[in-house]
Amino acid sequence: MNRIIAAALCLVSSLVLACSAAADSPRPNVLFIAIDDQNDWIGHLGGHPMAQTPNIDRLAKRGTAFLNAHVNAPICNPSRTSLMLGLRPTTTGIYGLAPWFRNVEAWKDRVALPQHFKAHGYKTYTCGKIYHGGVGGPAKRAVEFDVWGSAGGIGARPEKKLIPPTPMGDHPLMDWGVFPHRDEDKGDYQVASWTIEQLRNPPADQPFFMAAGFFLPHVPCYATQKWFDLYPDDDSVLPVVREDDRDDTPRFSWYIHWELPEPRLKWVNENNQWRNLVRSYLACTSFVDAQIGRILDALDETGLAENTIVVVWGDHGWHLGEKGITGKNTLWDRGTRVPLVFAGPGVKPGQRCTRPAELLDLYPTLVELCGLPPRTDIEGLSLAPQLQDASAPRERPAVTSHNQGNHGVRSERWRYIHYADGSEELYDMQNDPHEWTNLAGKPEFAAIIEEHKKWLPTIDEPPAPGSAHRVLTYDKTTDEAVWEGKTVRRSDPIPE
């Protein structure tokens, strides 16, 4: 009996010591890196066979890469709002490039991801593009971040546009190519430099949450010549497309990107700009990868890597001719699939996870990894199980929404799309990764469609007050869509 009591006391003592050690261990830092308009043209994702991103790829080897990660909205403001608030666009009603969520009565006091970290002892930093657009003003900034750094952005740009006006006019962002300038003159280089400076001077008495947002490969995508030289100046660099790719897609698939400054494939072909645009996008992707490499090197040099969770993510995809378009605003894989990599404490290295993941999941995942109090009012699922075992089950697919009623559901094998007028698409991503053959309407796939339909959002709010830019509404009674204030009817010709 005495031996049993002694053993029990020993066990209790060990547990107390273990708990004490855990309590005394420093909480991990968070390095939170965003890339604007970055699709799956990343080395380890295989979205483009020539993509050169050695630094993101080495981070993936150090941690876990999600090969089937998707955004919750295929455009900047709603995607970033969803991630930072932990709520779907269908819950907030924020679908377009406006409003800023703090200007919406229902969400003005919402506790965002960095704010939750700040409330629990973290010093918070930001630079570059983390939220969309200019949300300036010290009062607003102070809510979530303690320290604000370089604004980033385009940086050096040519005196005159490098490409001719697109069908939507001489839009200042619709430009790409190479011109004489230095890497150091680019906004993203300055974002990396500022981040490195902070890493070399971390807070002495508290962990940090440091967010760095890169602008490229967003248009205008300019790069210096050495980045262009990574990619051949011939048609081998172009993505594979089919001219009849939209023949089996519903007309409504055009409505969610009806008239945009981004040109159609027809225009870039006729103006001899397709290859230039593709090379520019790839060159800018490699340039941003190099800036991430500079930050990762600094993290290692400062000795912070061992206790810092690094997460790299893209805010939405981008088409470069696929489905006949360039730009964003779609519910296909090229518009929704993005890089998502975790590395650091609590993350098993060398994993490649094929389970579907959503950017919505970053909020609960980081909260769990850092041991912060969990939140019960967010809609994402923690990815912590997959960060320890890439094959761990996931209870639901990834869902992307673009305006009320338009949703894409992505499981491991299938992509299902449901539009506001009830039209549908279904693709077998295992056998048809380019999404060339729409299987919706074929009786043998009815059960698969029904399985995916059950994941459509049950909350599907109309656009929030103040919504503007890239906003679509649909009236079932009249069968009319309104895109950015302009009525679109079935009889209207699709813009070229």
Image (tube, rainbow, N blue to C red):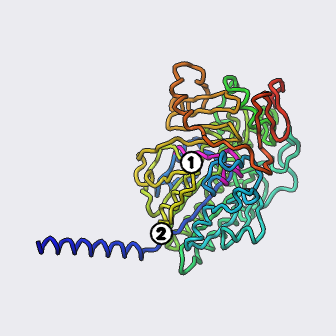
Residue 444 seen in the current view:
yes
Amino acid on which disc 1 is placed: Glu
Task: Tell whether label 1 touches label 2 (CB within 8 Å).
Answer: no
Along the viewing direction, whichever of 184 and 37 lies nearer the viewer: 37
Which quarter of the rendered picture does the N terminus lie within?
Answer: bottom left
Compare marks 2 and 1 and give the one earlier in the sequence. Answer: 2
Q: Residue at x 46, y 46 (%)?
A: 353
Q: Residue at x 49, y 54 (%)?
A: 382
Residue range corresponding to the magenta coloring: 67-81
Instruction: Decide whether residue 406 is among the magenta residues.
Output: no
Numbered circles on residues, count: 2
Instruction: Decide whether residue 74 is among the magenta residues.
Output: yes
Q: Which mark is residue 358?
A: 1
Name the residue at the bottom extreme.
204
Q: Residue at x 55, y 35 (%)?
A: 454
Which quarter of the rendered picture does the C terminus lie within?
Answer: top right
Along the viewing direction, whichever of 458 and 243 lies nearer the viewer: 458
Along the viewing direction, whichever of 102 and 56 lies nearer the viewer: 102
Residue that numbered label 2 is attached to: 307
Decide if residue 372 is on the left or right side of residue 267: left
